[in-house]
Image (tube, helix red, strand yellow):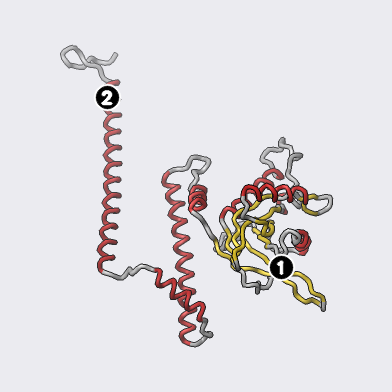
Amino acid sequence: MAPSSSSGLTFKLHPLVILNISDHFTRVKTQLNPPSSSCSTRNIPTSIHAASPQNVRVYGCVIGAQRGRTVEIFNSFELVFDPNTDSIDRSFLEKKQELYQKVFPGFYVLGWYSTGSDAVEYDMLIHKALMDINESPVYVLLNPAINHSQKDLPVTIYESEFHVIDGIPQPIFVNASYTIETVEAERISVDHVAHLKPSDGGSAATQLAAHLTGIHSAIKMLNSRIRVLFQYLVAMQKGDIPCDNSLMRQAASLLRSLPAAHSEKFNDNFLMEYNDKLLMSYLAMITNCTSNMNEVVDKFRTAYKKNSRTGPTGSRFPFI
């Protein structure tokens, strides 16, 4: 495991970068392993490093802005990997960089991204090749392997630091902490992607269950993190661990931002809104039941009229 960074930089990662990397990896892997054997693979992009679908690696650049000690990664674009020289296509990189500078003059190349479970020795060669664009590039690594027991995002951000190894200063990758930063447009887009209807149509109950499952997972994660923070503060109060004034100030700021929920007015408003929601649910169920009953009655009347015949005086004719 790589050591932690000591640069003191604060990294903010936008969801658009994660979506771009995931989309890039999915497209390349699908082209390498097409659903039909008749599909040709001669149009596979050269932005991959491995030829087998099980060991696909994609490469790209991440762009953003740095304000003081805060580095914010907004977007990314793909790079072309040359398998003959095992290097990045510099002409393509410079062209893409020039185009992005025209559209986003405030954004700069902050580093690069790739996919894999962990940083390998070969990654340092690509990292060094980008140091002429950014003297201290960042490396965003997305792990495409599915791990249902993992709660955190499978994204790791690395910085490079020079450490003395065997008397020789060498650059190594170090882990950098980051937070997810979103704007309104990104929140709407991510929410839309998360609630896309399944390809088989899906039922409303299935979509509702998936939505409630997501909310339950988010609440469960929030509860676990609050419990960890509470246990940490209790241990700090007992003197089991040294007091961290910076963390205490952050916890106090977090508590001050919470609403005063333990008040009689809040309880009354909460119960009133809760009862209103229950009443709306009950009315919706009654309306749905009434509509179904009307539909059954209409079908019964239609079937009865088609299967019976009456005479001029209203008496029925016998069926022949």
Q: Residue at x 84, y 50 (%)?
A: 84
Residue 144 can be seen, yes or no: no
> Where does residue 260 sit, x and y in percent of width and height?
33, 69
**Residue 75 to residue 250: above or below:** above
Q: Which residue corresponds to mark 1?
A: 160
Check the image and name the residue furthest to the bottom. 239
Q: Position of residue 293 (x, y in %)?
A: 27, 37
Under circle 2, the secondary element is helix
* Left or right: residue 252 compared with residue 18: left
Residue drawn at the location 47% of the way across and 79% of the way down = 233
Q: Is mark 1 on a helix, strand or loop?
A: strand
- Amino acid type, residue under disc 1 in the picture: Ser
The image quadrant where one finds the N terminus is bottom right
Q: Which residue is drawn at 15% across and 13% down?
A: 313
Asked which quadrant contains residue 111, the reply is bottom right
Q: In this view, does 290 lie to the left or right of 137?
A: left
Q: Quadrant of residue 314?
A: top left
Query: Tag 1: Cα neighbours inside 10 Å, few (<14), some, or many (≥20)?
Result: many
Q: Residue at label 2?
A: 304
Which quadrant of the rendered structure holds the C terminus? top left
In the image, is 216 to the left or to the right of 128? left
> Of marks 1 and 2, which one's residue comes earlier in the chain?
1
The foreground one among 15 and 284 is 15
Task: Give the amino acid type for the residue marked by disc 2 in the picture.
Answer: Tyr
Decide if residue 249 is in sight here: yes
In this picture, is 320 found above or below 143? above
Indicate the position of residue 54 as horizontal and vertical percent values: 71, 52
Give the Cα separation between the discs numbered 1 and 2. 81 Å
Q: How crowded is mark 2: few (under 14 residues within 10 Å), some or many (20 or more)?
A: few
Depth-wise, is mark 1 or mark 2 nearer the camera? 1
Tell me where residue 146 appears, x and y as whole percent. 61, 57
